[in-house]
Amino acid sequence: NGEWVNNLYGSQLVSRLSDPVGLSAFILMHKIRPPAQRSVLVRNGEWAEADTLSELGIYGTFLRRGKEVLLNEEVGHLVRTKRSDSNEGGVAAGFAVLDSPYLHD
C-alpha cells in the first residue's frame, strides 16, 4: 500500500512473510509483553493519562584499530514511553515521549 510501517504483527506479518523479496531487511523478534503502567504523557504542551509501556535503551561507544580495542564504554541512556496499545514507538514520529528513569530500592 506504499505506507511505511516499522513493525509488523499478526496478519500483516503473515502477509509480508509470504513474499520472500526483501526479507533480509527485516529482523524477526519475539514480542515482549510487559505489564502496562498508568502514566501521564506530555507532548506539545498537552497532557493525557494512559496505560503505557517504557523502553530503556543503553548506548555504547566502540572504537578499534585493527584488533586493538581503543574504546568500549557505556555512554548514555534514553527512556521512551508510549501508549500500551501502540505497535510503534518512535518519539520523532509522534508515537512515544522521552522519559526519565526513576530508580528506587
Image (tube, helix red, strand yellow):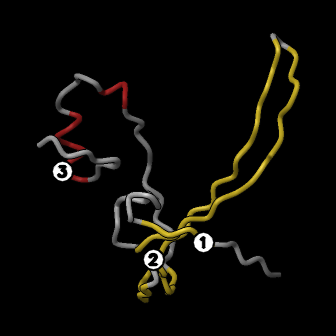
Mark 1 neighbour class, 10 Å CA radius: few under 14, some 14 to 19, many 20 or more: some
Q: Residue furthest front?
A: 45
| Position of residue 54 measured from the top left corner of the image (x, y, whole percent) | 55, 69
Viewer-proximal residue among 96 and 27:
96
Question: Is 31 on the left or on the right of 105, as rendered?
Answer: left
Viewer-proximal residue among 57 and 98:
98
The residue indicated by pointer 3 is: 11
**Mark whose residue sits in front, 3 or 1:** 1
Q: Which circle's residue, 2 or 3, is located before the other in the chain? A: 3
Q: Quadrant of the N terminus?
A: top left
Q: Tell me, for residue 43, which label it has, or none.
A: 2
Viewer-proximal residue among 30 and 52:
52
Tell me whether circle 2 and circle 3 mark residues in contact (CB < 8 Å): no
Question: Is disc 2 placed on a helix, strand or loop?
Answer: strand
Q: Which circle's residue, 3 or 1, is located before the other in the chain? A: 3
The residue indicated by pointer 1 is: 99
**Mark whose residue sits in front, 2 or 3:** 2
Residue lying at 50% horizontally and 69% vertically, measured from the top left: 97
As measured in the structure, the alpha-carbon distance from the residue carrying label 2 to the one carrying label 3 is 31 Å
Q: Quadrant of the C terminus?
A: bottom right
Question: Is disc 3 placed on a helix, strand or loop?
Answer: helix
Q: For the residue marked with disc 2, what is the amino acid?
A: Arg
As measured in the structure, the alpha-carbon distance from the residue carrying label 3 to the one carrying label 1 is 32 Å
Q: Quadrant of residue 99?
A: bottom right
Q: Which circle's residue, 1 or 2, is located before the other in the chain? A: 2
